[in-house]
Image: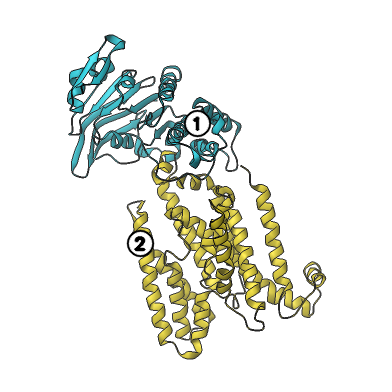
Chain colours: A yellow, B cyan
Amino acid sequence: MSRAPLIVVLALIALGSVFVALLCGSLSLTTSQVIEAIVKPVPGVVDDVVWKLRLPRVLAAFACGGLLATSGVLLQVLLRNPLADPYILGISGGTALGALGAVLLGAGVVGGNLAALAGALSAIAIVFALSFRAGDWNLHRLLLTGVVLSAGFTALISLLLTLAPQAQIRGMLFWLMGDLSHAHSSGAAWLVLVLVVSIFTVCSGSLNALSLGALKARALGVAVGGLQSALYFGAALATVAAVLLGGSIGFVGIMVPHALRLAGVNDHRWLLPASALVGGSFVTLADTFARTVWAPQQLPVGVFTALLGVPVLLFLLSRRP
Amino acid sequence: MKLRAEKLTLEIGKRVLCRDLALEMAPGELWGVLGCNGSGKTTLLHSLAGLTAPAAGRITIDERPLAGIARRELGRKLGILLQREDQEFWGSVREYVMLGRYPHARSLFGWQADDEAAVEQAVAAFDLTALATQAYVTLSGGERQRARLAQLWAQNPPLMLLDEPLQHLDLRHQLQTLELLRAATRASGAAAALVLHDLAFAARCDRILMLYGDGRHAAGTAGELLQAGRLAELYGCRIRSFGEGADTHFIPVI
């Protein structure tokens, strides 16, 4: 069944959410002001606010949401477990450990990002080395390795938090809850998002077959080993790109794919692009809330993704017979 | 297309199920695979389909080793009906059957007319037309089995391995399935191997493979192997035969 109209509607919603996010903030702008600033930019305050302050943050929020939702879809297919989310494999834990360790040691922005990346890559490498043997994935071992590694990282992060001086704890907590107030250049994240979504949408036939189980997929002619590796690294890449940009924003990766499945979008050809669009719109709106509800105080966006997401998912679940 | 196994040894854990098996499935042949529970019938089919590696031996399709054939290409040559599927399917019956076209898909977006045609034909062949738009999860056990058979039909490989194809089916659909397999092998030159427990249907096969589960096996024509004495030895129970020639029937002595 073609879901192309749905994708068009979701794309319009995505554009709408970006527009709303540009509209809202401590400096109140009218619709026409924002449109004017976008269509024919004239140097001035409005122009600066839209192009230099809000748009980079909105684009970062959208990329984060899209990446997390995409990663969630990929991991749910790979692990064939509805509870799989981008954080289940310990990748975000490794990233957080690297990032927070760098903060504690007083590294700058570049050093912090490098440390976070190093943490992410080591977590990816450890999980891969322990779970992938002789061209074959043991999915139970993969899941358990990820869960155990996550627990280890959580313990180390708690240790860092207790050792950290008072002044730095707030920033570290924001990072852990997911915070976009320092996210500005999202070019790399967008590149990853577009690449991962298009590659796996093109391979959606094999993802559909894999959702019937590895043996069945192999019987239908899917090279399962390669596909599983691709899923693992695709999901890992998407997670790392998102976490480096906005910290551990929770709930998007598990909520968005399930909400779409409950709404009847199951074919991965449509589920992947739909998840990216809904995830992006969702985090964009949540971040708009996060920076306006308690203005000028900025709240971590992760709080709002959960606060908005829990009731939606509970509603969808209760509606299901 | 010819599937050949040479010196095939199958093991599960430390147990040797089958030793030095030689088998050749030639076009037009319908094989019946018989044996007790746990005698290695499923393991044999999985090995022949390249899903599990045998402990020893060589499996080839038209002289090409199985391991050297890319998975997708293999899906166009050989199809297997699994005994069970653990995962639920999210879509309609037609979408489920359509997955059988995976190895044939040429375009990355959407299906071609011949894919659609193959699916419609398969759906109709197994009496699923009225259920085609219904969700797969709402089907009964027998209807699911027909959907699985239809998926293999849509895949349309010249070599077919079917693990208990008649399970859950009512009598009419058991007959219909066997007729379809018979027609596919006789008319289109396909070769198929069926794991069966029903001797009335085994008698309709051209050739029989018996697995004893202890390393021994026997292969031959249905006429040679389907004899009360041999079957009693295979199944470990007393079996009596009625009738003669093509009209021979076997029943267990109760």
The residue drawn where x is 66% and y is 47% is A4
**Is B190 above or below relative to A85?**
above
Q: Can the viewer see residue A40 in this picture?
A: yes
CB contact under 8 Å: marks 1 and 2: no
Badge 2 crowding class, 10 Å Cα cut-off, few under 14, some 14 to 19, many 20 or more, is some
Give the residue at mark 2: A144
Q: Can the viewer see residue B2 in this picture?
A: no
Residue B18 in picture, x, y percent from top left: 21, 33
- In the rendered image, the quadrant that contains the N terminus of chain A is top right
Residue B100 in picture, x, y percent from top left: 49, 36
Q: Which residue type carries mark 1?
A: Ala
**Is A229 above or below relative to B185?**
below
Q: Is residue B76 left or right of residue A199?
A: left
Q: Which residue type carries mark 2?
A: Leu
Residue B101 in picture, x, y percent from top left: 51, 36
Of residue B44 and residue A315, the one placed in the foreground of this image is A315
Q: Chain of mark 2?
A: A
Disc 1 and disc 2 on one polypeptide chain: no
Give the residue at mark 1: B154
The residue drawn where x is 46% and y is 69% is A92
The residue drawn where x is 26% and y is 9% is B244
Of residue A140 and residue B91, the one placed in the foreground of this image is B91
